[in-house]
Image (spheres, rainbow, N blue to C red):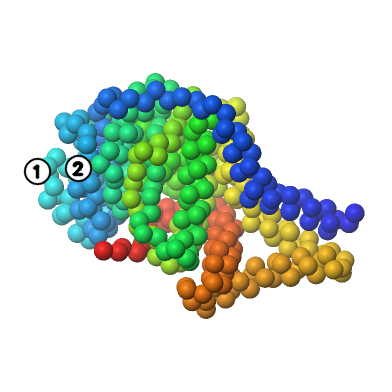
Amino acid sequence: MTLAAILLAVSSALVFYIIAGYPIILALLSRRPARPVAKRLDFQPSVSVLVAVYNGEQFIRAKLESLLGQKYPREKVEILIVSDGSTDGTESIVESFAGRGVRLLRVPRGGKAEALNKALPYVSGEILLFTDVRQTLDPMAMAHLAANFADPRVGVATGLDRMMNPDKVGEQADIEIYWRYEFWARHCHSRIDSTLVTTGSLYAMRRSLAEPIRPDTISDDAYIPLRVLFRGYRVIYDPAAVAFDYPTAEGAEFRRRMRTLMGLWQLHARLPQLFTRANRMRFHFFSHKSARLVLPWAILAVWVATLALPSSPFRSFLLLDEAALVVLAAVDRLVPKGFVLKRLSSPAKTFLTMNAAAILAIGVFFVRSDTGWRPTQVNVRQ
C-alpha cells in the first residue's frame, strides 16, 4: 500500500469518526440510565444576574423587561448591567430602569471577560446568572436554572438557545440543524455526567465557585464551566430554561464560528487539566470538541491523498465527488432560495465555510484575542 493510500485511509476514517462515528457512539451511551439531578423548583436561592454589553441599545430594553418578568421572587434577584465602554444609548436606557432595581456599572472598554471580572465584587447572590443582551428569556428560565442547584453536586447549569423564525432553506437553516445536533449532544453529555460547554446567552453557577478569568479569554461560557468541572462538580444542561435569539445575518455566522473556534484553541492551550483525570469527560471532549479543530485538516489530508494516488477509476471517482462539493458551494450564491439545488448547495457552502473558519481560528495564537468581542449581526424580524 502506498503512502498516499495510507494517508487517505487514515484521514477518511478520522473524518467519518468525527462526522458520524462519535454521534453513533454518543447515542448508544446516552441510552444508559441518566445520572439523576435533584432538581427542585421550590428551591429558590438568591440570584445575581450579570449582563456584559457593548453598544446594545437595540436590545437592552427588551432584555431588561425579560429579566424583570421572570417568575421568581423579585426580592431574591439583583440585576447588574456592565457597560463595556458603550458609546450608544445603552447606558441611558439602563439608567431609566433604576427605579425598578436595575443597576449599571460602567467600565472602560476591555472585552467581555474583563467586564465580568470587574462585576464580581458588586454582586452577592448565591447563584450568578450570566446572559447576553440580545436574547430574551422565557419567564421560567431563571427558576429552572436555579432549581438545579438544589443538588449539591451541580456547580453550573445552562439552558437552551432557541432561534426565532429561521429560514427553512439557506445558511440559517443549515446553522439551525447544527445547533439542534449541538444541543442534543449537550443533553447526552449531561445525562452521562456533564456537558462540555454552556449556552453563552444563558448559564448559571454557584457564586462560591466564581473566580476572575484572564481578560483576553474568548469563550467564558466554556472556560468557566470547565474549571468548575475540574473541581468535581457537574455541569448540567436543562432544556426547560430557554433563551430566544435572532437568526444571524447572512455571512455573519462565519465570524461567530471563527471566534468560537479561536476560543476552543485557547482552551487547549490554557487548560492542561483537559488532558488529565481531572477532566472526567475527556473522551467526549476530544471526540466532540477537539475533533472540530482536527476535522478541516483531516479533510485537506483526504484531498491531498486523493491527488497523490496513482491514476485509476477509483481516484477519478473521488476527485469527482470532492470537486462536486466545492462547485456546489461556489455556486450557492447564484442559486435562488426556491430552487431544489439550494438544498444541496447551501449545506455544501456552510460545511466548507465553517471548516475554513476552523483553519483560520488557529490565528488566535498570532493576533490579539480580545478583538473578538463585537456584537453579532442578526436579522431582527418584527
Q: Is residue 121 visible?
A: no
Q: Which of marks 2 and 1 is in front?
A: 2
Q: Quarter of the image holding residue 306?
A: bottom right
> Which element is circle 1 on?
helix
Q: Inspect this view and state whether residue 133 appears.
A: yes
C-alpha distance separating marks 2 and 1:
15 Å
Where's the N terminus, which quadrant? bottom right
Image coordinates for residue 16, horizontal then vertical, percent: 69, 50
Name the residue beneath numbered marker 2: 69
Rendering quarter of residue 80: top left
Q: Looking at numbered disc 1 in the image, what kind of residue is underneath it? A: Gly
Residue 253 x %, y %:
46, 61
Q: Dot 2: what SS?
A: loop
Q: Residue at x 19, y 48 (%)?
A: 65
Query: Which disc is residue 99 wearing?
Result: 1
Relative horizontal placement of residue 132, taking residue 30 as reference (left or right) = left
Along the polypeptide, which appears first: circle 2 or circle 1? 2
Front residue of 284 and 168: 168
Q: How many numbered marks, from 0 up?
A: 2
346 vs 122, left or right, is right
Which residue of the protein is positioned furthest toward the bottom in this rendering? Answer: 334
Type of the residue with mark 2: Gly
Q: Which residue is drawn at 46% across and 56% down?
A: 176
Local packing at callout 2 (Cα closer than 10 Å; few below 14, some 14-19, many 20+) is: some
